[in-house]
Image: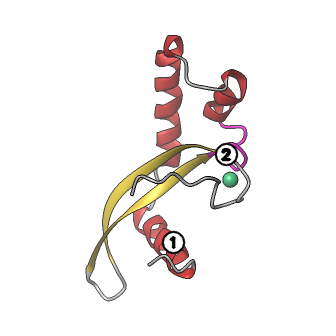
Amino acid sequence: MSSVPPACPRCRTGEVLAVLRLPSTWTNASGRPVRGHGEVLLCARCDAGDPLVTYFAVHGTARTEHAELLARLLHQWLGRARPQTPDDDALRAETEAWHRGEL
Ligand SMILES: [Zn+2]
């Protein structure tokens, strides 16, 4: 389970800069707990305009001398990326994976 998606699953062309995996447990429609994880991707294309994407666009890679700035940008991104309603996002991810035949 260490494979990294080669391209963004949303636009299928963008470069995935970061993947946030959110372990989650939610209750499905029949009331049974379901364990899984939701993934939030930082895509160079879908998330263009995000300061974190801008950073990578400018610098190409994470630089140690920018650790503090990167930490701040990452933190801000996590704040935005973290689903407001984890259940919905997890379910949506599950549904999409199911439609792709991955489950
Ligand atoms: Zn994308």
Left/right of residue 41 with respect to residue 27 in the rendered view = right
**15 part of magenta stretch:** no
Q: How crowded is mark 1: few (under 14 residues within 10 Å), some or many (20 or more)?
A: few
Left/right of residue 54 with respect to residue 69 in the rendered view = right
**44 part of magenta stretch:** yes
Image height of 82 relative to 86, above or below: above
Query: Secondary structure under badge 1?
Result: helix
Q: In the rendered image, which quarter is residue 1 located in?
A: bottom left
Q: Which residue is drawn at 72% across and 37% down?
A: 49
Q: Residue at x 66, y 37 (%)?
A: 50
What's under tag 2, amino acid-wise? Glu
Q: In this view of the protein, can residue 84 be seen by the observer?
A: no
**Mark 2 = which residue?**
15
The magenta-colored residue range is 43-50
Residue 27 disc label: none
Rendered location of residue 92, percent (x, y): 51, 72
Q: Seen from this angle, which residue lies furthest bottom? A: 30
**Mark 1 = which residue?**
92
Rendered location of residue 38, percent (x, y): 43, 60
Q: Does mark 1 have its CB less than 8 Å from ligand 1?
A: no
Q: Is the magenta stretch mostly helix, strand or loop?
A: loop
Left/right of residue 5 with respect to residue 21 in the rendered view = right
Q: In the rendered image, which quarter is residue 13 located in?
A: bottom right
Viewer-proximal residue, 37 or 4?
4
Rendered location of residue 24, percent (x, y): 32, 61
What's under tag 1, amino acid-wise? Arg
